[in-house]
Image (cartoon, coloured by chain):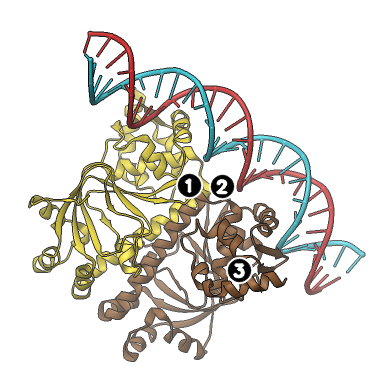
Chain colours: A yellow, B brown, C cyan, D red
Amino acid sequence: MPPKQNASHTYMEIVRGLPLLEGMTETEKSALLGKGRIFSYPRKTALFLQGDAVDSFYIICAGTVQLVRSTPDGHDVTTGLFTEGDALSEKEIFTAADRHSLSAMAVDGVVVLKLPAEALKQSIASSEALARNVLASLARAATLAEREVEQRVTMTAAQMISCYLQHMCVAHDFKPEGFTLPYKKSLIASRLGMELETFSRALPKLREHGISVSGPRVTFEDFAAIDAHACARCSVNEFCTTYKSLRGSADGATAAL
Amino acid sequence: MPPKQNASHTYMEIVRGLPLLEGMTETEKSALLGKGRIFSYPRKTALFLQGDAVDSFYIICAGTVQLVRSTPDGHDVTTGLFTEGDALSEKEIFTAADRHSLSAMAVDGVVVLKLPAEALKQSIASSEALARNVLASLARAATLAEREVEQRVTMTAAQMISCYLQHMCVAHDFKPEGFTLPYKKSLIASRLGMELETFSRALPKLREHGISVSGPRVTFEDFAAIDAHACARCSVNEFCTTYKSLRGSADGATAAL
DNA sequence: CGGCGTATTGACGCACCTCAAGGTAAGTGG
DNA sequence: CCACTTACCTTGAGGTGCGTCAATACGCCG
C-alpha cells in the first residue's frame, strides 16, 4: 500500500522549527528539507518493515509511530513510541546498517517528512550545527536506552508504570492534576515490555503510591508518595525536577481534595 | 587515590591506530591526542564516580573498565564492560550532561588516554572524519542498548548467557573450540543483569543447547543447537555470520568428539 | 593449617507470564 | 431501538523463572 502524498506546507513549517535543526541557517535548512517530501500513513500501515532497505530519514509531523520487533515465536516487542517532532531511523543510517531490524507502524494517522538518507549525511558534512544536534540526539537515545535496561532490572512493574506516566506527563505537557492516556493501555504495556494483564493489575497498586488511574484517566495525587515509590530509583525523571516548584501548590491541592 | 601517570609511548601508538580515529590526518590526530595524557588505574579504583563532573573523554589502552550504577537500595548494576580500544563517556559529553550518572571502575589494572572533553568537541568540529566516526560509534551504542532491552524482555537467562558467550567469542577473537572466560563469573552475571546464582544454575542447562562450560572453560560444541536456542532470537549475533563458514568444519569436529 | 574470595547447590517466595473467563463500550445491521 | 459483533480491558487461577537467604565446596595465599 503506497503512502498518500500530501501537499501541505504547514508541516514544513513545523519541521523548520524543530530543535534538531536548531542553529542551521535558513539556506541550510532549505537545502536539506527541499530534498524531502511529506507522506501520510493511515492507521496500522507500515512506514517500513523489518528487512527493508535503510534509505530514508523520517521526521514525524503528526501522529504516533510504534517501533516493533517481531520475534520468531510470534511475540511483539515495542521498542519505542514516537510522536510529532521525533526523528526515525537516525541510528540505522549512521550505523551503516543496510536493512531495518525493526518495523515502524503507524499507530494512528501519521504524517512524516521523508528525506533520503544521503541528503542527511551530506547536510551533516556541511552544517556543523546539524552535526552537533544529531550527535546530541544519538547520545541522548543511547543514554535513554541504557537507563531502560537498568530499570527493567531494578524496578517492579508498578514502578516502571509510575516512571512512564511521569515521563509522559512531562513530555506531552499534561497537567499532573489529571490527564487522559494518549495511547491504548495495551500499547503502553507493550512499550514497557510487560503483558497487558500485568499492566492492568499494577494500576490499582499505584493508588497506594500517589497515582490514581481509573479508565484512561490519570491523576497524580501525592507527590511525596510518588517520589518515594519511583523517583528515587528512576534516574531519568524530569518529572521530579520539572514539578519541584509545583509541588508546594500541588500538596496544597491534595490537602484540599 | 590519585591515578599514577605513565610516560609510556607505545600506548599512544595503539590509540593512533583505533577505528575511532580512522580517516583523520596525522596532524589532526596529533592535535587531538597531544592534549591528552596517559593515566593508569590499579584494580578496584575509580576512573570517575557517579556525581563527578563530566570533563574528560577516555580511550582505554589496556585492562577492563566496568560501568556501574549503585541504586539507593544498595544494588549494583553493571551497565557495560569496556576493554582495550573502547571509548568512555562519549555519551555524557554529547548529551551535555554535566555530571556522571554512573561510576567507572577498573576491573583490573587499567591504562587510559584521558582527553579534555573540550578537546574532543573541538576536533569534531574541525575533522569531518572524526565526526563521522563518533556518530557511528554513538549510533552503534544506541542500537546495542536497545537490543539489550529487547533481550531482557524476550529471552531467558540461559539464552542471554548463550548470546553473550557468542558475542564475547567474536569480540575477543577467541577460538569457538574452547576458550577461557576473561572475567570472573560474578562480573559477567552482573553485566547480564542477573544474580550470580542464576548465572551459575543456567550454565549446566547450556550443555543441552550446544555450549559446555566447566569452570572458566567454555566450548561451543553444537552449532546447530546453539542456533536453535539463542541465535534465532538474538538479532545482534555476529557469531552466526562470523562462523557460518566455520560451521561445516565445526560440525565435523563435533561428530569427531 | 586457617582465612578469604569465589563459585555451586538447595529451599523458598514473589513477580510476572499464560490461559481462560467475564465485562465494558463502541460500532453495525436489521 | 435493540440484538449482535468487535475491540479493549479486567479479573481469576495456576505455572515458572528468577531473586533471596543460607549452607557448602573450591582455590589461593599468608
Around disc 3, counting alpha carbons within 10 Å, would you say few (fewer than 14), some (14 to 19), or many (20 or more)?
Answer: some
- Residue B222 falls left or right of residue A34: right
Q: Are marks 3 and 1 on the same chain?
A: no
Tag 2: residue type? Asp
- Residue A182 image offset from top left, x and y in percent: 29, 37
Q: Residue at x 48, y 47 (%)?
A: A233
Q: Residue at x 54, y 70 (%)?
A: B65
Establish if D4 lies above or below A150.
Answer: above
Q: Residue at x 28, y 81 (%)?
A: B127
Secondary element at image label 3? loop
Instruction: Identify the disc placed on residue A233.
Output: 1
Along the viewing direction, whichever of A192 and B232 lies nearer the viewer: B232
Residue B178 shows up from this direction: no
Secondary element at image label 2? loop
Residue A211 shows up from this direction: yes
Chain letter belonging to callout 3: B
Q: Earlier in the sequence, mark 2 or mark 3?
A: 3
Q: Are marks 2 and 1 in contact (CB under 8 Å)?
A: yes
Q: How many marks are shown on the rendered structure? A: 3
Tag 1: residue type? Arg
Establish if A62 lies above or below A212.
Answer: below
- Residue A247 image offset from top left, x and y in percent: 34, 37
- Residue B144 falls left or right of residue C7: left
Q: Which residue is mark 2?
A: B73
Q: Are marks 2 and 3 on the same chain?
A: yes
Q: CA distance from mark 2 to mark 3?
A: 21 Å
Along the viewing direction, whichever of B179 and B115 lies nearer the viewer: B179
- Residue B4 falls left or right of residue B89: right
Secondary element at image label 1? loop
Q: Which residue is mark 3?
A: B44
Q: Are marks 2 and 3 in contact (CB under 8 Å)?
A: no
Chain letter belonging to callout 1: A
